[in-house]
Image: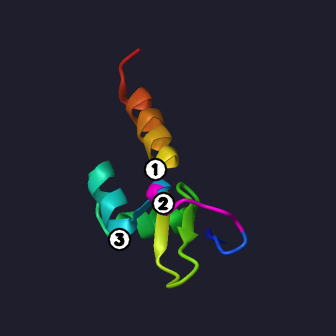
Amino acid sequence: MFIPMAKKRFALKDYWTIKQAADFLGVTTVTLRTWDKLGKLRAYRHPANRYRLYKRSELVAFLKRVKKRRQPS
């Protein structure tokens, strides 16, 4: 799901490119695009060039959820 950022006020420092996000999560950019289509992660669009951007805080929260699920009970 793409959310245009032009109508929202944002600080670019709070967002990562698809490559930065993929490196942080340890996956490929193709995987991020797939997760975006499936609704697992939200991709924002840069208002000037329409590139995908991922909010840093959402990626950290996503990684914590995944790690929590993998911990044995």
Chain-order first, disc 2 or disc 3: 3
How far is disc 3 from disc 1 in space, using C-alphas?
18 Å
35 or 48: nearer the eye?
48
* Residue annotated with mark 3: 30
Give percent across and percent down for residue 61.
Answer: 49, 39
Q: Residue sitting at 53 percent across and 56 percent down?
A: 41
Q: Is residue 50 left or right of residue 32?
A: right
Give percent across and percent down for residue 40.
Answer: 54, 54
Q: Name the kind of residue labelled 2 in the image.
A: Tyr
- Dot in front, 3 or 1: 1
7 or 69: nearer the eye?
7
Q: Which residues are magenta?
A: 8-13
Q: Is residue 60 above or below residue 43?
A: above
65 or 56: nearer the eye?
56
What is the quadrant of the C terminus in the image? top left
Give percent across and percent down for residue 21.
Answer: 36, 58
Within-10-Å neighbours for mark 3: few <14, some 14–19, many 20+: few
Q: Are marks 1 and 2 in contact (CB under 8 Å)?
A: yes
What is the quadrant of the N terminus in the image? bottom right
* Residue annotated with mark 1: 56
How far is disc 1 from disc 2 in space, using C-alphas?
6 Å
Q: Are marks 2 and 3 in contact (CB under 8 Å)?
A: no
User: Which image quarter: residue 71?
Assistant: top left
* Residue annotated with mark 2: 54
